[in-house]
Image: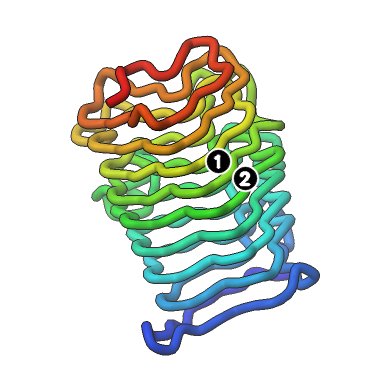
């Protein structure tokens, strides 16, 4: 139990690894206030153990080329992992994220949060967009009880990859106007490839910009399977964004609103 900081960087040839088995668990003194693991380093590997009972499991700031692998992160007050403050080129893979948003505010219980909401740019990045770019989320299982989006790519971010993940919608927040999909993309040039979702609050995947200029553009969705089991569509794209491609090789099942809000191609 404590507030743990990873501050020493490795190199591409010699990364530093923090590892342990599932029985090794980091937790914070107070899940309403403190994050468990603060990632402030480059070229490190976080692997194999558990993080629980914290405000956030892992919170990265200005962290680059790190790998978060084979982790079990659960019972967080807010999101499980937050990569922000221009954190780039990080990978989250082969992990399990569940039981987030446990502090009574289900709308901030995201699984993985990439970047920063524009309303917080003044605090986090000195008023400029949070360019937490080229981060990858792969082969990770989300749910049950991830209360908000499983993955959210915020405005200002570019070039993320969301691939091969499983989204289990049991326990998602119900009836919210905007928090109603497994994946929400507000950034640009994301690739969302080969994911599978089962049971959502409303839509499967969403692309929008919150009216932030030049955001929500040029995102590509391909080979995803969306078993929505809800009233929305498999893929909802705001008419205020441009360049999104919903490939016809995606599969949508039991979405009352249909395949997508735009034609596939």
Image vertical order of residue 151 relative to residue 181, above or below:
below
Q: Is residue 155 left or right of residue 140?
A: left
According to the picture, the residue beneath numbered tag 1 turns out to be 150
Question: Which of the image's four quarters has the N terminus?
Answer: bottom right
Crowding at dot 2, Cα within 10 Å, few <14 / some 14-19 / many 20+, comes out as: many
- Viewer-nearest residue: 202 or 55: 202
Question: Could you say whether the residue bearing mark 1 is in a helix, strand or loop?
Answer: loop
- Viewer-nearest residue: 141 or 115: 141
- The answer to whether residue 250 is visible is yes
Q: Which mark is residue 182?
A: none
Residue appearing at x 70%, y 31% in the figure: 170
Q: Is residue 142 left or right of residue 64?
A: right
According to the picture, the residue beneath numbered tag 2 turns out to be 142
Image vertical order of residue 96 relative to residue 6, above or below:
above
Find the residue positioned furthest to the bottom: 14
Image vertical order of residue 233 relative to residue 132, above or below:
above
Q: Picture coordinates of residue 187 (x, y %)? A: 31, 41
Q: Picture coordinates of residue 111 (x, y %)? A: 57, 46
Residue appearing at x 31%, y 18% in the figure: 262
Q: Picture coordinates of residue 21 (x, y %)? A: 74, 73
Image vertical order of residue 132 relative to residue 12, above or below:
above
């Amino acid at each position: 139990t404590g507030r743990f900081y990873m501050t020493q960087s490795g190199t591409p040839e010699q990364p530093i690894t923090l590892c342990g088995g599932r029985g090794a668990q980091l937790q914070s003194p107070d899940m309403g206030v403190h994050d468990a693991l603060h990632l402030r380093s480059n070229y490190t590997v976080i692997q194999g153990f558990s993080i629980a009972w914290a405000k956030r499991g892992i919170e990265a700031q200005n962290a680059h080329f790190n790998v978060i692998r084979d982790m079990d992160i659960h019972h967080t007050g807010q999101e499980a992992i937050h990569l922000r403050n221009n954190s780039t080129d990080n990978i989250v893979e082969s992990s399990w994220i569940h039981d987030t948003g446990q502090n009574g505010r289900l709308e901030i219980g995201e699984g993985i949060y990439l970047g920063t909401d524009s309303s917080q740019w003044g605090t986090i990045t000195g008023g400029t967009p949070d360019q937490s770019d080229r981060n990858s989320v792969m082969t990770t299982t989300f749910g049950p009880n991830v209360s908000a989006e499983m993955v959210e790519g915020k405005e200002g971010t570019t070039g993320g990859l969301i691939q091969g993940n499983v989204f289990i919608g049991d326990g998602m927040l119900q009836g919210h106007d905007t928090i109603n999909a497994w994946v929400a993309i507000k950034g640009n040039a994301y690739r969302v490839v080969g994911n599978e979702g089962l049971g959502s609050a409303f839509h499967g995947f969403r692309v929008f910009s919150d009216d932030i200029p030049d955001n929500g553009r040029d995102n590509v969705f391909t080979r995803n399977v969306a078993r929505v089991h809800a009233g929305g569509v498999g893929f909802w794209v705001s008419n205020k964004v441009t360049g999104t491609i919903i490939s016809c090789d995606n599969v949508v099942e039991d979405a009352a609103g249909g395949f997508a809000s735009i034609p596939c191609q």
